[in-house]
């Protein structure tokens, strides 16, 4: 009985280390990325749109892309390609 409980605990720890922990780390990195957004940053959205940030609000970001002004949700920014100078 004790071996079975020990094996279940061991499997739960492995599950946490392999699946849950990396996801938490990724979420923390994404949160830090969004907090660091500022005007002038060149970004890529989840939809693949590349643009320059013109303004940042609490929940939205305004991008300029090919002479077009787009307003997207802040969470849709997937990466910063180039930081503003």
Image: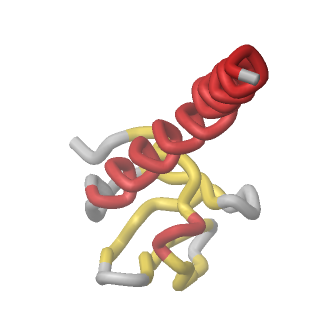
Residue nearest the observer in this picture, 61 or 12? 12
Question: Where is residue 61 shown, x and y percent of the image?
Answer: 43, 76
Residue nearest the observer in this picture, 33 or 48? 33
Q: How is the image coloured?
A: secondary structure
Q: Quadrant of residue 14?
A: top right
Label count reads 0
**Residue found at the very far left of the displayed protein:** 85
Left or right of 82? Residue 78 is right
Left or right of 74? Residue 4 is right
The C terminus, quarter of image: top left
Question: Where is residue 69 shown, x and y percent of the image?
Answer: 54, 82
Left or right of 63? Residue 41 is left
Q: Is residue 16 above or below residue 48?
A: above
The N terminus, quarter of image: top right
Q: Residue at x 30, y 82 (%)?
A: 57
Question: Where is residue 72 shown, x and y percent of the image?
Answer: 56, 79
Q: Residue at x 68, y 20 (%)?
A: 2
**Residue found at the very far top of the displayed protein:** 3
Question: Where is residue 17 shown, x and y percent of the image?
Answer: 59, 25
Q: Residue at x 64, y 27 (%)?
A: 9
Q: Is residue 71 above or below residue 35?
A: below
Residue nearest the observer in this picture, 61 or 1? 1
Q: Quadrant of residue 12?
A: top right
Q: Residue at x 61, y 39 (%)?
A: 20
């Amino acid at each position: 009985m004790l071996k079975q409980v020990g094996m279940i605990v061991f499997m739960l720890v492995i599950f946490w280390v392999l699946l849950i922990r990396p996801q938490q780390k990724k979420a923390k990195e994404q949160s830090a990325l969004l907090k660091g957004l500022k005007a002038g940053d060149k970004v890529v959205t989840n939809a693949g749109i590349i643009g320059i940030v013109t303004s940042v609000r609490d929940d939205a970001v305004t991008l300029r892309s090919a002479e077009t002004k787009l307003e997207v949700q802040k969470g849709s920014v997937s990466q910063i390609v180039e930081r503003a100078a």
